[in-house]
Amino acid sequence: MGKIVTLGEIMLRLSTPGQLRFTQAHQFDIHYGGGEANVAVSLAQFGHDAHFVTKLPKNEMGDAALHALKSFSVNTNFIARGGNRLGIYFLETGASMRPSKVIYDRTNSSIAEADLADFNLDEIFKDCTWFHWSGITPAISKKAQVLIKAACQKAKEVGATISVDLNYRKKLWTPKEAQEVMIPLMSYVDVCIGNEEDAELVLGFKPKHVDISKGELSLDSYQTIFKEMKEVFGFKVIATTLRESFSATKNGWSALLMHQDQFYVSKHYIIDPIIDRVGGGDSFSAGLIHGLLKMKPQDAIEFAVAASALKHTISGDFNVVSETEVIELMNGDQSGRVQR
Amino acid sequence: MGKIVTLGEIMLRLSTPGQLRFTQAHQFDIHYGGGEANVAVSLAQFGHDAHFVTKLPKNEMGDAALHALKSFSVNTNFIARGGNRLGIYFLETGASMRPSKVIYDRTNSSIAEADLADFNLDEIFKDCTWFHWSGITPAISKKAQVLIKAACQKAKEVGATISVDLNYRKKLWTPKEAQEVMIPLMSYVDVCIGNEEDAELVLGFKPKHVDISKGELSLDSYQTIFKEMKEVFGFKVIATTLRESFSATKNGWSALLMHQDQFYVSKHYIIDPIIDRVGGGDSFSAGLIHGLLKMKPQDAIEFAVAASALKHTISGDFNVVSETEVIELMNGDQSGRVQR
Amino acid sequence: MGKIVTLGEIMLRLSTPGQLRFTQAHQFDIHYGGGEANVAVSLAQFGHDAHFVTKLPKNEMGDAALHALKSFSVNTNFIARGGNRLGIYFLETGASMRPSKVIYDRTNSSIAEADLADFNLDEIFKDCTWFHWSGITPAISKKAQVLIKAACQKAKEVGATISVDLNYRKKLWTPKEAQEVMIPLMSYVDVCIGNEEDAELVLGFKPKHVDISKGELSLDSYQTIFKEMKEVFGFKVIATTLRESFSATKNGWSALLMHQDQFYVSKHYIIDPIIDRVGGGDSFSAGLIHGLLKMKPQDAIEFAVAASALKHTISGDFNVVSETEVIELMNGDQSGRVQR
Amino acid sequence: MGKIVTLGEIMLRLSTPGQLRFTQAHQFDIHYGGGEANVAVSLAQFGHDAHFVTKLPKNEMGDAALHALKSFSVNTNFIARGGNRLGIYFLETGASMRPSKVIYDRTNSSIAEADLADFNLDEIFKDCTWFHWSGITPAISKKAQVLIKAACQKAKEVGATISVDLNYRKKLWTPKEAQEVMIPLMSYVDVCIGNEEDAELVLGFKPKHVDISKGELSLDSYQTIFKEMKEVFGFKVIATTLRESFSATKNGWSALLMHQDQFYVSKHYIIDPIIDRVGGGDSFSAGLIHGLLKMKPQDAIEFAVAASALKHTISGDFNVVSETEVIELMNGDQSGRVQR
Amino acid sequence: MGKIVTLGEIMLRLSTPGQLRFTQAHQFDIHYGGGEANVAVSLAQFGHDAHFVTKLPKNEMGDAALHALKSFSVNTNFIARGGNRLGIYFLETGASMRPSKVIYDRTNSSIAEADLADFNLDEIFKDCTWFHWSGITPAISKKAQVLIKAACQKAKEVGATISVDLNYRKKLWTPKEAQEVMIPLMSYVDVCIGNEEDAELVLGFKPKHVDISKGELSLDSYQTIFKEMKEVFGFKVIATTLRESFSATKNGWSALLMHQDQFYVSKHYIIDPIIDRVGGGDSFSAGLIHGLLKMKPQDAIEFAVAASALKHTISGDFNVVSETEVIELMNGDQSGRVQR
Amino acid sequence: MGKIVTLGEIMLRLSTPGQLRFTQAHQFDIHYGGGEANVAVSLAQFGHDAHFVTKLPKNEMGDAALHALKSFSVNTNFIARGGNRLGIYFLETGASMRPSKVIYDRTNSSIAEADLADFNLDEIFKDCTWFHWSGITPAISKKAQVLIKAACQKAKEVGATISVDLNYRKKLWTPKEAQEVMIPLMSYVDVCIGNEEDAELVLGFKPKHVDISKGELSLDSYQTIFKEMKEVFGFKVIATTLRESFSATKNGWSALLMHQDQFYVSKHYIIDPIIDRVGGGDSFSAGLIHGLLKMKPQDAIEFAVAASALKHTISGDFNVVSETEVIELMNGDQSGRVQR
């Protein structure tokens, strides 16, 4: 299968065991994760030649992140080494009405301060067929914005499909800052993943024919919004997950895809219990990329939703599932019967 | 904020990890807990100057209990040291239809055998604005009864509000023994926390106008009962939690407050899954005290219920939540969305 | 109480902690389990003189399996020692829509290669009142088939009741192989445990008056099937559990018993969450044996279902519950209230 | 092999993991141990029909202690059930110059309050060939003194050899109290295990020809002392371990045996590192009993010392070693080469 | 006892369990530590009114550091809250010839960017009798240099004794930078702790009469150096530990004190095994402060060395020992015998 | 650097945590290891393009072994998938005089039953500069013998250096069987690693001028033996480690190299404590290969010994050290000082 490139930050994730609160913990479980890294891991599990591009400090913390990526078969040849530090995020997993909490400690990370010269974009994008990034990466620093723009240009040159997960992060930038950077970048984007809230915050997009201030949207409204987004930004494909947050433990989960002006709605899942919902969106993006590359649109969105539903049952940011497992679920087996 | 005093026993809690049964365990998780200690910890989290009074053995087990209290900002200056031992309770956490089990090993504890002379009640209650205790404390020994009575008198002298959680414990005394001790003590009590069952067992109270032998009571019946209790015992405030035990993992949760002859019913929560329900009642008492001190009655009962709902999602006896977190829940956010 | 013998394989079970996937695990939890061993453990918990017969390698892995059995009061006097290895199975526990997975690594185990000469059947079955085995045991090897047949004969000689759990395992043999071996063995069987699917695969049984190809069966259909099975095989008692697999975490659970041509349907339970469903069927068999020995038919099936419902809330293959606990549940207390 | 009976207390041992201090621990490792129980476990590992007699509370803590004994093949048929509680001891393991610490919480345990009527001594001592007890048992209560005396008488009646480990415990009684109880009991004893310090404290024994106030004794002095002890108390066999405490991690270890007026000195071992020295003396007693029953005196003392040296390398009170392993060490293989 | 103030940085310490390498770890053990925080904890254990001054971020990571300090009875009333982050250090514990490794991730921490205005120095130093800081604090930022200078002035004003641990950290500053800052600060210092290497790097001190380029120094040479240091800087007391690093597991340990021109050499210890040597120097400083406040000089240095020897046997940065335990060791009991 | 190929078996290693005995363990730590796999991992850490060739079952156990290899940067492109099972070995780590124990459960593994057709030897050995294997691989099955022979031929064709670690395993074959297979294979070997004992068992080699029946050999005797081995088998390089087994915790460690008829003796290390000695020999082989490829003979043997000394301080089979760390140790820094 073709070469896929993702570019962004991978962080050390320190999560309290079980559902312990931060002040109760005496150990942290170690995971590694970050939007684009999670996508690369998923794609490698589905059999793709997935490359993750970032910069890691030249110390054992950087080595350990590299170990994690390699163990899941991600190609790490283009990861630069150097800089100050590995970004960190702390995670406390909630339960029932108690939400999970994330504390970021990611400023001045090696990738945030990486220069264009750290990467040989010609080599990286040689034979690349798909490039994926998220709205988090340009949010981490000016330098990262330069990098993302150059990467988009190079990806475009080699004819790769470009997908973006809008992913607004309020701790990293304001809507105004986001829009200044992100709107111009949309000209490179073929596949846009995000909901109306992200579109408003990140792209300054306000639908003309739908009032999004009134809470939950109907599928019809979403379709109207997607059509308008296509008009404004020229996206070929738009998709969003539709999460219903009943509690930290129980969510509804489905998705909507617009592909060549057709709409495709996925099956609806109830996920109960959620083991770990961090990385849920990334597993959807990866499932969608895989689906769009190998399946018809309806199957693509079903694959993406089934993949990300499974992610919620798995500890850590990475979606440790095979293509076969996802297909079994999308084909209808939710019974959870023991597989002997 | 004003000084609050609670007095009682804190025990070493030894619980099996996960949901292991006692005979399966090869390790115990260490927590510390006890009705009044739990209330003090909660109040300290809400920002109060919370003092817990007890007696701990002069060995490392006593030191460790002290560490736990101090780490949660409880004032431990009035804790006496000496005596035989730290009381222990063993906890096996259930799941679904399998109930949790508690085995007490608390006889002859230092606080059960403490003398009045171990405590300088003048110092302890100086500037005290609220005194809280539970029906467990006088149940542990004759000496503890003497102590509680003296404490109530001193608290009354300094003008503190006095609250009691009736909390009948059948392993510690009979209803007859309980009533002989508890009924006279009620003359000191301003705020009574407990349901009709506790009232019957601990106070020998049988409502005239409600038949409590027929299972679940209506809110109307509870109101009638509360009115009658007020008449008999003169409580200014009466409150009770209303627990629906669907299983060891899933409970319904709400509460009723009578305040100046007005009734206030809280929102109703479904807690699923329950991580640890021990200390749920104590977190309600603490939430109520905080609410009554800082809020209007309806908010007070909402705060108390939201605080104790959150407690069910947290390991250990202590309710490790901040005032802000409780207020977010009582204001309606049960979605469990990740807080980044 | 009388002596009960079970005969089969016990394996080392290596399960990933929590709900970790196989490739995420850095530790395995150690348990021991196997159909007949699980039944023996349950019966020992209910107070029976339960003997488990197998062959274990003469090394520390064999010793450790023996420790586990002894600690749960199973009589291990007739366990032979020697041969190659202890069978192993790897278990990954699922959650929500992600199923649990079992990987068997049991070929060439000591019991699979055991000779008749390894066992003194006269001694083993002396005073035996009940003999239980499952369809797994003859599936593991030709030698095991010889052993099971000889054991059935001996059990018959001493007048013991013989029960079988049909338990088809597709990784061990084909339906054709199974039927060649199992059908003749049915002549020894008094009590048959299994559903229509097992009956078809293991016994080649196809009901004349029920079409089992159309998914879920009604209770009426089951009754018809049971009657036909009795006609064909002469079983005195037939029972089956009725599992509804909503997800890996949530199951419906009930059972049907035919006893002296009467039918008995148990209460219906929702088990949520399931902690560990491996060994659920074995705990039912053990509960049924205990019930049939000590209770009337309706109580027997209630006991069996309550026992196995509890099993689903307990880690490991063994059903670590007492008779008292089962009776409390079958008498209706599903509330999960803390037992202090 | 013949039936051996030991009688005493078994406690729940709660030890901090690794070398954590008490106030640092958030979990306790669970073990079970007690002088005579440890001896019974060792003897069962060496192949004896070892019976441990005690009384355990009728709750899951008592069950768990029983599980531990059974898993190591100790015969528990004569263990009474009932009473208040299982005794507990807390253990913090030291390192280098930091000593290990033990906190006892054993008062009012079921065995301390057991009555003679709890035990059928006729049954217990039927066919008994050896009875072992320690100076700890009569120290725990008056009732235990009655029990030990009756047991000694019964053991004598059936012709069993009686061994005692003097084992003075200053937290349980004073030398004066000890001597009043223990001196009369010595008339039953054939084999006495203890050093000059224990002999002085427990038996009030002061050697005439050796000055024991001057620190470490020579082997000659020990021989003189043993001869004098024999004269006074009539012991047939006297033995003592000779521990050199260099640090909590490193000890020298050897022993001296007087048997039919002959002296036998064992090899000298350096144990480094010590994994767990609790139960070291008990493993020596068990090794000596096994040795005296099956070997010549020199081999007996070598076996006892090698067994107890190995104990120091094993976590928990129980000496989990086989006769074969002890013999390999006593035959000289201290190389620690991997056994494949 | 009098009030003691220490000021500096406390970090989250993330250490791999056991002796795992960074790339092998899947969990980190959580501790908190930092030079001056460690000293404050030690002093609180010895019974002092120890205040630690720092700035912690206003998030749960800051809360957790606060919990740790409070649990060990450190007064945290003067800790400011706010700023970016809690500094972190990663620790891998070595063994034998493999050294331990520390990776710092402490830039931009809240204390490094704290302003003088964050602290009310008048309140902090009111009634202060001793002020301790280390050369690490001014190394972390310019702002910290301002803070340390102001604190020294205030301490001097109130008549407190001022001690410094020179502690050169090459990752934080160059010798040149260090000397520019540190030499002027020495005018405030009464008690200087450090060896000739630190003195050279931090103070630019080169002894006239000793050649320190030739490896290990004799005690005579140290005495000469100390005298010269006193002449140059006017210290009243100078002390240094004398560590012999045989391996990561085994060290020699002693110390030298110059007090009123007299020299005092401590006993010499072999520490084997070392459980955790991080914080060893800080425990010496704390022991010395306690010793100088309460004992004669020879006892003071013996106390400091014994305290820090014990620290090497304890996990974490904090020296969790009582005054009694240190005195027992300094009085000669290194036997490691179990304390029952 | 050039491509290096190793070929053999990798097993799932299940080791008891800490120093627990097999019958005490309730969890196993998961590692992966095997002679040639360990060598490949080491070489990848030193920066080589290291390929490991084996066959793994097509299940998650095989996947997990693959994860482990990939995470340490071993090239796994030529690993075949299929067959029955992953070989397993159980490890109990000893301490002091208690030896470590290994129980093998490796029969019928996928690699033992692999066919020549599973591997494309042309591809595997293309551009290969070094091929390493051990005497364990041909011992596991006839098929493996065929495979090793074909691999040696292909390696010879492409001009690769061939090294063998003789490594006799008595559980896998007899000396007679070994010699029949191994002697002919020696004609391919350039570099032979093993001691006189292995040479005798595996190669039937008995030195003419040295009597090896008399225990420890002098260096002179070793030199004589090496010269004779060269004469008989034509090895260009011969090397052996010289282990002194003082206990399971403490070993002496050095090595001897014969290179172009010159002898090189390494430094001598005392390793105390040993954390994990499994894989010690493999880390020596890898260090020697690296050394011979990049250094002069004396440095090569120093590198090999330092690398393998470090291995003894690291958990698991894999030698998780960098070239830099080994060089620091071989250059003399054994002090274990903390590296900050």
Image (spheres, coloured by chain):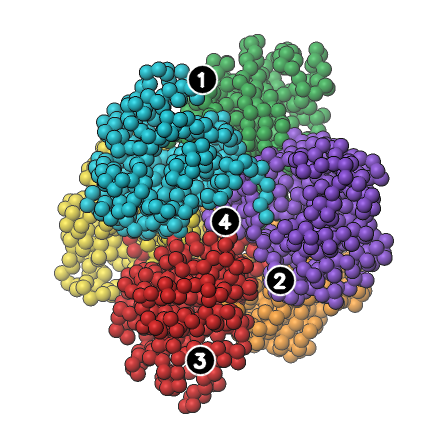
Chain colours: A red, B orange, C yellow, D green, E purple, F cyan
Mark 2 belongs to which amino acid?
A: Asn
Kindly identify which chain the residue marked by label 2 belongs to.
Answer: E
Residue E338 shows in this picture = no
Numbered badge on residue E108:
2
Question: In the image, are marks 4 and 2 on the same chain?
Answer: yes
**Which of the pair B41/E96 is nearer the observer?**
E96
Q: Quadrant of residue A334?
A: bottom left
Within-10-Å neighbours for mark 3: few <14, some 14–19, many 20+: few
Mark 3 belongs to which amino acid?
A: Pro
Numbered badge on residue A184:
3
Q: How far apart, in angstroms, are the residues tagged by discs 1 and 4?
A: 52 Å
Q: Quadrant of residue C12?
A: top left
Q: Is residue F322 left or right of residue A306?
A: right
**Which of the pair A10/D211 is nearer the observer?**
A10
Q: Is residue E257 left or right of residue C172?
A: right
Q: How far apart, in angstroms, are the residues tagged by discs 3 and 1?
A: 90 Å
Do tag 4 and tag 2 residues touch (Cβ < 8 Å)? no
Q: Which of pointers 3 and 2 indicates the residue nearer the eye?
A: 3
